């Protein structure tokens, strides 16, 4: 099975190789930089990872991460005496030992073959990584400059569907800073609060909405029909930790606490100082507020064409209400997670004069 062809691996290899060569070639700074793989190595690694994802070891599907780097670039690492063959059988056998987040199997050429030399947690920025998320679902990604931050996704392969992440069209269209962070452009630490919040929202699987509003005004209340759970005084644990620069277990617990509130029917209202103001909030059009009729849907994927859609085609009630809220409260941001894993960020575009809906689930895997 390891020698069978997985056509999408061949289809994306050249594009992904060009991405790494371009970004690594432009990288600056004293930190060690990864070595760009060629298209043949990319195809081989993706092919092995895909077929491994369809196998089982003791009834469990493997979740593994493969990193392309030589052993000497991995710092303190677990090394095997004899490099192992890169094939689905080997990957499936090793999967239980490396399934925890942050552990990568190191892959590097040995003669004319790619082999597994061991496992490591330390990889340089822009290192080529293929992660098996679930059977048939792979993500090609690289580490950002921040070693504690989420990896930047380059491509998502799910069965015969391929999504290549492209930033240019979205970045030139007044996208929210949070979306640019997802695209791999490190930004202010405040924007990085929304990234773990989005991951937490998506992880609980219930779906949910999060509204980010200015801390120095109550104008947002005009677009809320009812607030069954007003938080008084505002819950400031997350905000206090952010202001102290904390990124420890307490920060993670605070993130998960706020993320958990989004599972309650209605929206969580969070100030831009990261204090919880309310949850379970019901969004509705104010008496004098304009009704949102169309939204421009954008997805940072190669080949995607931004499309104006009627709000009735956006999705469920969460999406419609989030679009309406941003249409009225144009200095606010709305994040919506669906039960099926879709994730949408709603923001107002001053240039276009309308609400933009950014589909970003491919960036959160």
Image (spheres, helix red, strand yellow):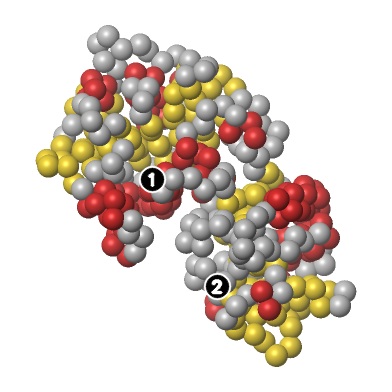
- Give how far apart the Cα atoms at labels 2 and 1 are: 26 Å
Element marked by disc 2:
loop
Picture layout, residue 92 above or below residue 150: below
Picture layout, residue 69 above or below residue 6: below
Identified at 74% across, 83% down, the residue is 83
Going from N to C along the chain, the mark reached first, 2 or 1, is: 2
Picture layout, residue 88 above or below residue 314: below
From the viewer's perspective, tell me whether residue 27 is left or right of residue 175: right
From the viewer's perspective, tell me whether residue 243 is left or right of residue 111: left
Percent position of residue 319, x then y = 41, 29
Whether residue 62 can be seen here = no
Mark 2 = which residue? 121
Percent position of residue 356, x then y = 49, 25
From the viewer's perspective, tell me whether residue 209 is left or right of residue 15: left
Pick the front one: 178 or 159: 178
Question: Badges 2 and 1: C-beta atoms under 8 Å apart?
Answer: no
Pick the front one: 37 or 137: 37
Give the foreground label among 2 and 1. Answer: 1
Quarter of the figure with residue 173 = top right
Percent position of residue 267, x then y = 29, 36
Identified at 22% across, 27% down, the residue is 217
Whether residue 263 can be seen here = yes
Percent position of residue 290, x then y = 35, 11
Mark 1 = which residue? 190
Q: Residue furthest left?
A: 232
Identified at 53% across, 22% down, the residue is 296
In the picture, the quarter occupied by the N terminus is bottom right
Identified at 46% across, 40% down, the residue is 178
Which class describes the residues within 10 Å of circle 2: few (<14), some (14-19), or many (20+)?
some
Picture layout, residue 79 above or below residue 342: below
Which class describes the residues within 10 Å of circle 1: few (<14), some (14-19), or many (20+)?
some
């Amino acid at each position: 099975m390891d020698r069978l062809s997985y056509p999408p691996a061949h289809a994306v290899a050249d594009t992904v190789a060009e991405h790494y060569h371009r970004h690594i070639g432009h990288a600056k700074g004293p930190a060690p930089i990864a070595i760009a793989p060629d298209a043949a190595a990319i195809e081989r690694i993706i092919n092995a990872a895909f077929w491994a994802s369809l196998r089982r070891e003791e009834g469990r599907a493997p979740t593994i991460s493969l990193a392309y780097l030589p052993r000497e670039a991995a710092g303190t690492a677990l090394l095997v005496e004899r490099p192992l063959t890169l094939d689905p059988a080997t990957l499936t056998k090793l999967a239980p030992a490396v399934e925890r987040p942050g552990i990568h199997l190191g892959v590097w050429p040995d003669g004319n073959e790619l082999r597994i030399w061991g496992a490591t947690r330390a990889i340089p920025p822009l290192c080529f990584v293929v992660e098996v998320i679930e059977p048939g679902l792979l993500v090609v990604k690289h580490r950002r400059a921040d070693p504690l931050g989420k990896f930047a996704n380059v491509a998502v392969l799910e069965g015969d569907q391929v999504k290549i992440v492209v930033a240019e069209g979205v970045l030139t269209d007044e996208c929210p800073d949070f979306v640019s962070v997802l695209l791999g452009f490190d930004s202010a630490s405040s924007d990085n609060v929304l990234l773990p919040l989005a991951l937490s929202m998506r992880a609980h699987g219930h779906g949910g909405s999060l509204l980010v509003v200015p801390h120095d005004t109550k104008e947002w209340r005009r677009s809320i029909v009812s607030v069954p759970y007003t938080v008084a005084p505002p819950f400031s644990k997350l905000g206090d930790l952010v202001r102290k620069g904390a990124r420890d277990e307490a920060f993670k617990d605070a993130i998960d606490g706020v993320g958990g509130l989004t599972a309650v029917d209605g929206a969580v209202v969070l100030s831009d100082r990261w204090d919880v103001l309310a949850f379970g909030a019901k969004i509705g059009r104010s008496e004098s507020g304009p009704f949102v009729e169309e939204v421009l849907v954008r997805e940072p994927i190669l080949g995607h064409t931004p499309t104006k859609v009627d709000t009735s085609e956006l999705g469920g009630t969460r999406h419609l209400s989030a679009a309406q809220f941003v249409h009225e409260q144009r200095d606010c941001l709305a994040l919506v997670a669906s039960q099926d894993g879709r994730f949408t960020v709603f923001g107002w575009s001053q240039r276009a004069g309308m609400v933009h809906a950014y589909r970003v689930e491919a960036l959160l895997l």
